Amino acid sequence: MNNCFEEYNKKLLPAEEAVKVIKSGDWIDYPLVLCAANELEKALAKRKDELEDIKFRATMSVWPRYCVEADPDGQHFCWNSWHFSSVDRKNAQKSLAYYIPMKFSEQVVMTRNIQTDIFMAMVSPMDKHGYFSFGAAASASWASIENARCVILEVNRNMPRVLGGNQECIHISQVDYVVESSNPPLPELKPAQPSPVENTIAGHIINRMRNASCLQLGIGGIPSAIGALVAQSDLKDLGVHSEMYVDAFVDMTLAGKITCARKNIDKYKQVFNFAFGTRRMYDFIDDNPGVVSYSVDYVNSPEIIARNDNVVAINACLEVDLFGQVCSESIGTRQISGTGGQLDFVDGAYKSKGGQGFLCIPSTYENGAGEICSNIKATLTPGAIVTDPRTSTQMLVTEFGIAELKGKSTWERAETLISIAHPRFREELIKEAQKMKIWRKSNRIY
């Protein structure tokens, strides 16, 4: 028998046995999204009454949070997240989850400088050479592993085996315990159906794209719209260097639009940090040499991003003020998501030769009382988190057009942002700009 399989069998334990290594006061690190532990946590939740002050550190929960459910008063377990999902948001409202502020590109460095006792991850099955793939997320796993006193892997045969450029796998010799799961299907994120407004916003961006653009896409309806429009366009030789891998990339690849042939680095490779989408997409990235996973300090480094020419970064935001400050993660003080890698790609795209960093937002939203409100405001909502400072914001896009902000003074910014606000709010915004002394008498009136 191959030595790696002998070692595998020696380290193989039921989940209930593996989690006995966890003790009160431990910090437990998970990789993000799909790769967080599932059945290991379910086993740990059963030990609730034996343990105190167990603290989790994770990103975007998509599996059930068994320990939170088992401890509704938060007396034994404390959940902390680098980026909120809908599950995390709900738990935060009950004071059962807490946000960790970060720029995603810095997570590796931050993880190396904080306490980690246990690392638990869901991985693909071990290959003949003794390696487990981290699958849908390389993220900052190795930084956690280097700190941890114990590494426990949960094998799920549904996890894609993703090839990579760095830190995308781990060898059996570097693992303490292995648990074979019941192989539950991976959670899926169905592509959002774009609204008419999102299709219009996507159209503005498509008109600015050129052959050999290198794409980064965020989450939501606009990436879906971009994918559909690109697939029908005359664009060619597009590249991919993206924090998140979404179904739109599969659509564009199968339409022959993505080749990565004209990238400056990682040529012929679609580069990503984590994937979240449909089973179709998971199957597409499985064992695919053309789609590779890298650690987040590589993928999200603005300097690395900028090494490719014509980077097109497309992300969503929640509100923007007339100074160009952008909030993409909170409603007032209520944390909705996180800073994530948006600022990394805004900066990286701007530094790229020919690069364009688009922040997309419908001009209006409907509040709880059924009133239509402007997403472009004189000043941000009190308590709103500034995700992108005005010094970084390059381009804002609504259904009314694109506002380019770099190099513009405060009055120029106010003018161009008001020009893409909904017409019914423009006069009001002009009055607010005048009060704040950022409106010139010679400005155009929209």
Image: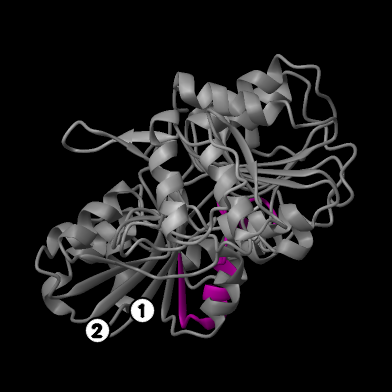
What is the three-letter code of the residue carrying label 2? Ser
Query: Can residue 1 be seen by looking at this rendering?
Result: no
Whether residue 207 is situated above or below residue 261 in the rendered picture: above
Whether the magenta-drawn stretch holds residue 426 is answered as no
Density class for disc 1 (Cα within 10 Å; few <14, some 14-19, many ≥20) is many
The structure residue drawn at horizontal position 25% and vertical position 57%, both measured from the top left corner, is: 42
Q: Residue at x 62, y 46 (%)?
A: 442
Front residue of this view, candidates 264 and 268:
264
Q: In this view, does 380 lie to the left or right of 46?
A: right
Task: Give the residue displayed 58% in from the left and 52% down from the top.
Answer: 440
In the image: residue 283, left or right of residue 433:
right
Please state the horizontal and vertical placement of residue 315, each as a whole percent of the image: 56, 44
Secondary structure, mark 2, is loop
Residue carrying label 2:
24
Region in magenta: 127-152
Residue 7 seen = yes
* Residue 353 pos. (x, y %): 86, 51
Mark 1 secondary-structure assignment: strand
Front label number (1 vs 2): 1
Name the residue located 19 percent from the left edge and 31 percent from the top edge: 370
- The residue under label 1 is 27
Q: What residue type is labelled 1?
A: Trp
